């Protein structure tokens, strides 16, 4: 397959594998005859339950296998995906949805409203927007095989956005029997109704994950736009090749052993750009937003003053420089909890992020009564970005007088560990 053909073909998968928060930085020539895309993801696919956890590597793979009722477009507007039509009562309290015809799971069973309802109930338990809806819910139930209703005691204007959003966990629809799995327990069957089937027999965590085109998938007729429109699969097979070492991934890309590397190391980008057979670009104008996650359930971070101390000392630029270097065209600090470039962006409430005082942080830490208890910092070493951020975090905590227990592990272990609510 020549480079021009590959770029055109890859665009057909863009609404899936490169939508909503994903970069599409590097493409190379691939093995063409079998229409196989060889993709190096950001991390290992260690588990495959897109509701149980929030890791984007799982979300990305899940977008191939499972479908959602709605999908947001590039204007952040929810568009129908699995849904044929919806109505809402004048008072905003009763929503009625109807599925489009021809939806089928990978095991051959038709998608019904029972599957949707049970899947949404499982999603609700793990998603912030789902929990908000649950708090005002009167009833979520099937009407017949093709339609269901959602009755609320208070209007929720963001209902359709919640059903089509791109951040984890998404509203992935599974067969009812699978969706009955406790939301805090991982599923063991990976059957969806999306454009690709997961080939479990070829899944080797830490090495490879394989997806094959689902012949019975019926895409929408609209033009693909992020997670909306027709999901037209141009490849027969997608192979995820796990390469945690950036140098190995870069060499494989340049040698034509893989076709697409999702997150190239910043130091290697100039090398890739000099290769005429490699295209390097930024596929997502929104970029990625890092988050400093503290365990609010247990000491010392269950104390608000300890959390404030860390925030007061934190310098966003230290993190961004550690990931992409000094080229400030690739990053910018922001005093906000919201995504810049989106309709709801605001810096309200972000005043504390503008403070950068280690002395003030130490004062707050003392006021909190911190007495040198060890703080566990769990850091994935198989992702260059998380490793860099972990190193910066450890130094930050030490700088304000905290004792740090640095645990170096892999991204899959980080995901499993942070999902636990037991004391560290």
Image (spheres, helix red, strand yellow):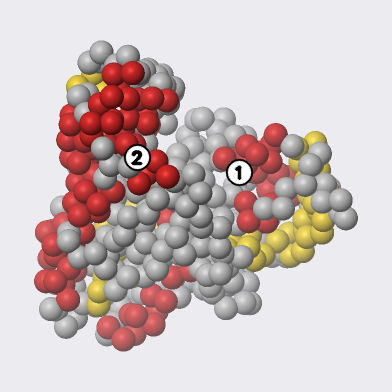
How many residues crowd mark 2 within 10 Å: few (<14), some (14–19), many (20+)?
few
Q: Quadrant of the C terminus?
A: top left
Report the front residue among 198 and 376: 376
The spot of residue 276 in percent (x, y) is: 16, 83
Q: Which mark is residue 292?
A: 2
Query: Residue at the location (55% across, 33% down)?
Result: 183
Query: Residue at the location (56% across, 69% down)?
Result: 75
Please identify the quarter of the rendering in which residue 423 is found: top left
Report the front residue among 30 and 136: 136
Please identify the quarter of the rendering in which residue 313 is found: top left
Q: Is residue 347 above or below residue 405?
A: below
Q: Which residue is mark 1?
A: 129
Residue 394 is at least partly visible in this image: no
Drawn side of residue 42 relative to residue 396, left or right? right
Q: Is residue 48 above or below residue 73?
A: above
Q: Quadrant of the N terminus?
A: bottom left
The spot of residue 309 in percent (x, y) is: 32, 30
Query: Residue at the location (31% across, 33% down)?
Result: 310
Residue 330 is at least partly visible in this image: yes
Please identify the quarter of the rendering in which residue 55 is found: top left
Counting residues from the N terminus, which is met first, the one under dot 2 or under dot 1?
A: 1
The alpha-carbon separation of the residues under discs 2 and 1 comes to 21 Å
Query: Residue at the location (33% across, 42% down)?
Result: 355
Report the front residue among 352 and 344: 352
The spot of residue 184 in percent (x, y) is: 51, 30
Secondary structure type for disc 1? helix
The spot of residue 381 in percent (x, y) is: 20, 42
Drawn side of residue 13 relative to residue 149, left or right? left
């Amino acid at each position: 397959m020549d480079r021009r053909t590959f770029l055109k073909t890859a665009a057909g998968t863009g609404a899936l594998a490169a939508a909503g928060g994903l970069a599409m930085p590097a493409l190379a020539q691939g093995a063409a005859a079998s229409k196989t895309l060889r993709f190096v993801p950001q991390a290992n696919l260690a588990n495959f339950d897109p509701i149980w956890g929030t890791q984007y590597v799982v979300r990305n793979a899940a977008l191939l296998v499972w479908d959602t009722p709605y999908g947001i477009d590039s204007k952040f507007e929810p568009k129908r995906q699995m849904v044929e039509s919806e109505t809402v009562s004048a008072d905003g309290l009763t929503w009625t949805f109807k599925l489009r015809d021809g939806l089928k799971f990978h095991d051959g069973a038709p998608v019904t409203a029972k599957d949707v309802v049970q899947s949404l109930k499982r999603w609700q338990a793990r998603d912030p927007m789902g929990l908000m809806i649950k708090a005002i819910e009167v009833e979520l139930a099937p009407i017949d095989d093709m339609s269901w209703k959602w009755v609320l005691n208070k209007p929720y204007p963001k209902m359709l956005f919640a059903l089509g959003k791109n951040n984890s966990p998404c509203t992935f629809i599974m067969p009812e029997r699978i969706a009955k799995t406790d939301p805090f327990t991982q599923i063991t069957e990976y059957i969806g109704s999306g454009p690709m089937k997961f080939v479990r027999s070829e899944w080797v965590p830490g090495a490879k994950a394989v997806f094959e085109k689902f012949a019975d998938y019926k895409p929408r007729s609209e033009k693909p736009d992020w997670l909306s429109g027709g999901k037209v699969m141009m490849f027969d097979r997608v192979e995820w090749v796990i390469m945690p070492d950036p140098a190995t991934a870069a060499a494989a890309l340049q040698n034509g052993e893989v076709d697409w590397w999702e997150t190239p190391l910043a130091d290697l980008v100039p090398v890739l750009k000099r290769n005429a057979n490699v295209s390097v670009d930024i596929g997502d104008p929104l970029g990625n937003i890092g988050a400093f996650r503290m365990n609010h359930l247990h000491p010392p971070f269950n104390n608000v003053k300890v959390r404030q101390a860390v925030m007061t000392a934190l310098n966003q630029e230290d993190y961004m420089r550690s990931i992409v270097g000094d080229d400030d065209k690739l990053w910018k600090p922001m005093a906000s909890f919201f995504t810049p470039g989106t309709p709801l962006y605001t810096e309200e409430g972000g005043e504390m992020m503008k403070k950068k005082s280690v002395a003030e942080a130490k004062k707050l830490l003392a006021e909190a009564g911190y007495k040198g208890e060890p703080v566990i910092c769990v850091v994935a070493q198989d992702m260059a970005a998380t490793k860099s951020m972990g190193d910066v975090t450890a130094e930050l905590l030490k700088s304000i007088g905290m004792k740090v227990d640095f645990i170096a592990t892999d991204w899959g272990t980080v995901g499993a560990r942070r999902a636990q609510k037991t004391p560290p």
